[in-house]
Amino acid sequence: MVIGGSRGIGRAIALRLAQAGFDIWLTYRSNHEQAQSAKSEIEKLGRACELLCFDVSDRAATEAALRERAENNAPSVVVFNAGVTRDNLLVFMKPEEWSDVIRTDLDGFYNVTSNVLFSMIRARKGRIIAVSSVSGVVGQAGQVNYSAAKAGLIGACKALAREVGKRNICVNVVAPGLIETDMTANLPKDKILPLIPLNRFGTVDDVASVVAFLCSEPAMYITGQVIGINGGLAT
């Protein structure tokens, strides 16, 4: 199950997991066209794809979409990739700019995981991977809300890894740096690239490949970890 899988990093993760042999539950909030396109690409790879449209910040809607489905068929993998930004300096930040980001990026993780976790515990296996950000690791001016939410994901996953490890469920975090997506399209690359030792923005496939590894058999002893995918921007 890829939460936020219709475009960008989430889409790349869904496709990479389909290539690895997983059938996909792909969730999205509103972009039906992009979701249908992702579904078609997954099906071309010979895997099944079910689309689930709901807003992870809405607890009732998330429960309605996931609880019964998970009880009947526990997901082997949950990738939480939902996220929004409402960038502003804290001194000017409006309450809704804070709460919109926290509700989606952090509360959404609870809303999703709480509805599928029991079925995974009962199955005694699974992988949970949250997509955080370099902003959650080192902080970023103008992103106090986003940094707080993404740092919260890291703490939540580290704690959850300790709770469910005995049930053979691995919980990890990937923390991408500057990845070429719609969210970074307008950033001044000429000013940012000198800060990145590898001298390039990352690609969505850079992230998807690490997620796919964490879902594979060779990663069976990795849990509670934060893996930076940032070209050396932060350590």
Image (cartoon, helix red, strand yellow):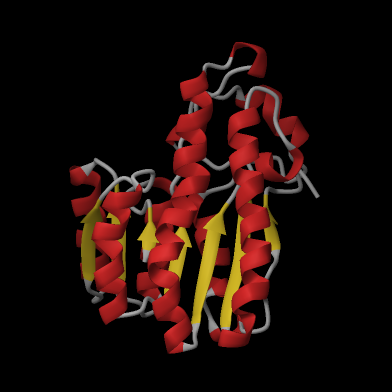
Q: Is residue 82 left or right of residue 165?
A: left
With 13 as the anchor, is 215 left or right in this view? Answer: right
Q: Is residue 125 visible?
A: yes
The answer to whether 67 appears left or right of 88 in the picture is left
* Depicted 151 relative to depicted 64: above or below: above
- Quarter of the image for residue 73 reads bottom left
The residue located at (59%, 31%) in the rendering is 145
Q: Is residue 158 left or right of residue 30?
A: right
- Front one among 213 and 200: 213
Residue 155 drawn at (x, y percent): 68, 55
* Percent coordinates x, y for residue 106 in the rendering: 52, 46
Point out the residue furthest to the top here: 92
> Where in the figure is residue 129, as x and y percent of width and height?
54, 64
Q: Residue furthest front?
A: 60
Q: Whole-percent x and y of residue 51?
A: 22, 59
Q: Identify which residue is drawn at 59% across, 41% down.
A: 149
